[in-house]
Image (cartoon, rainbow, N blue to C red):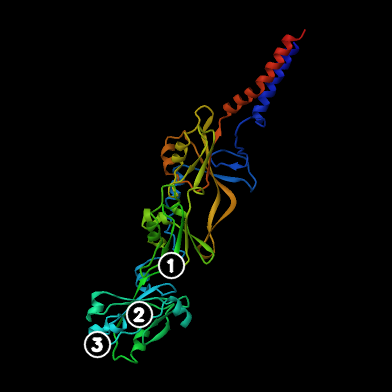
Amino acid sequence: MISRTILTGLAALSLGLCSACSFTPGAFLDNSNLQDPQVAQKPTPADMVQVQPIDAGYFSHVSLQTTPAAACPLTCLSPQTRTQYEYRIGPGDQLQVIVWDHPELTSQGGSAAGGVPPLPTLPSAGAGAAAGGSSLAATPSTSPAATGGGEPGGLTLRVAANGTVFFPRVGRIKVAGLTAQQVQERLTAGLAKTIRGPQLDVRVTGFNSKQVQVLGDVRTPQAQAITDVPLTIIDALNRAGGAPQDADLQNVGITRDGKRYQIDVASILDDGNVRQNVVLQDGDIIDVPDRTNSRVFVLGEISKPSIVPMNRGKLTLADALTSAGSIDSHTANPHVIYVIRGVNPEPGPNGTVKTALSKPDVFRLDMTQVDALMLMTQFQLQPRDVIYVQIANSARFNRLLDLITPSLQTLFFTKQLAP
């Protein structure tokens, strides 16, 4: 009689625990602070979280919101910027100077061509540094045109560390920060003092003063020189061998003047958004992250709880659940599948992006509805979303029974063994 009373009390206690669910083992999401418009509830306080059902009404509302193409946070390539682009000469660059009809200024073959004695050999790097404080290196051309007296060859000059070059009959001039056309004008004005109507051609043949660094998840991380052709972020990634599949092209960073700007390169490739094709500048650092931060978490009553990476910033709810092995058919509640979104990116100053923690946005999907599978394929997830599949009440009850059954068995066998 006593044992029967004990068993009856334990059974009643188990039912009470099941209703309270305070001792149920396993994962469970307390939805007491969630306000679902599809479920009748009492008036709730202001701190309740509104649940948005994922249904046809939700998509009819979302379809009205058109997302404009993101504006370029920096100077991006356009027909106007391409025509306005000018390369500025800097220390370490190489210039080629050609003086037409005066090979004696650009070659050592002047005496053979026109009877003019050749100029003395220009000073070497060490002598130039001692004489004028620069590391000038001049290399006369030995092309047939230079030695034959026809079209003259060119004299290659290296811009010294102080930004100057030395040219015969002109002397040392400062060229750093100038374009090739401006250097041509200065040399023309200098030679006009000794030559009537000099005609010059100046071009940059070695681009060594300006470069960018391409780092991160690319096939060939390397430094890349900026030339007289605008270097864009797409050009830099192509020169680096492209990005592998696990690269997060949606969040490529450009660090300039100590600030990191987020560039959506994926939108350039997928949507043709040329407003993200940034023109790079000297000293820029391009970092291509992997998909560590572009992932979602699938938890709860799932066959294989896992972290699912996003592909170029895109992933649907159906993709995430399928990658995790779908819901557990024995314990999951197909009526309640939550998508919890709590970290929202916000635009920061100067084109930067910051994240802010706020009250989470909660969405709920009912997989028992006939259009649920279609809705799953249309619902786009965002980085760091959490998908939680709720446990069924029957599964919670069974887990509670599994928890108290050993105690009941112990009491039963203790009663049987008692004298």
Disc 1 vs disc 2: which is toward the camera? 2
Q: Nearer the viewer, residue 172 or 67?
A: 172
* Badge 3 density bin: few <14, some 14–19, many ≥20, Cα 10 Å: few
How many numbered discs, if any?
3
* Badge 1 density bin: few <14, some 14–19, many ≥20, Cα 10 Å: some
Q: Earlier in the sequence, mark 1 or mark 2?
A: 1
Q: Quadrant of residue 269?
A: bottom left
Q: Earlier in the sequence, mark 2 or mark 3?
A: 3
Q: Is residue 64 left or right of residue 300?
A: left
Q: Element type at marker 3?
A: loop
Which quadrant does the C terminus fall into?
top right
272 to 389, vertically: above or below: below
Q: Which residue is mark 1?
A: 75
**Residue 115, numbered circle:** 3
- Alpha carbon of mark 1 to alpha carbon of mark 2: how far? 24 Å
Q: Is residue 273 visible?
A: no
Disc 1 vs disc 3: which is toward the camera? 3
Position of residue 337 measured from the top left corner of the image (x, y, whole percent): 52, 37
Q: Are marks 2 and 3 in contact (CB under 8 Å)?
A: no
- Alpha carbon of mark 1 to alpha carbon of mark 3: how far? 54 Å
Position of residue 118 measured from the top left corner of the image (x, y, whole percent): 30, 84
Q: Element type at marker 1?
A: loop
Q: What amino acid is found at the position of numbered circle 2 in the picture?
A: Gln
Q: What amino acid is found at the position of numbered circle 3 in the picture?
A: Gly
Q: Residue at x 63, y 30 (%)?
A: 25
Disc 2 vs disc 3: which is toward the camera? 3
Position of residue 226 measured from the top left corner of the image (x, y, whole percent): 40, 67
Q: What amino acid is found at the position of numbered circle 1 in the picture?
A: Thr
Q: Are marks 1 and 2 in contact (CB under 8 Å)?
A: no
Position of residue 155 measured from the top left corner of the image (x, y, whole percent): 33, 78
Q: Residue at x 61, y 26 (%)?
A: 399
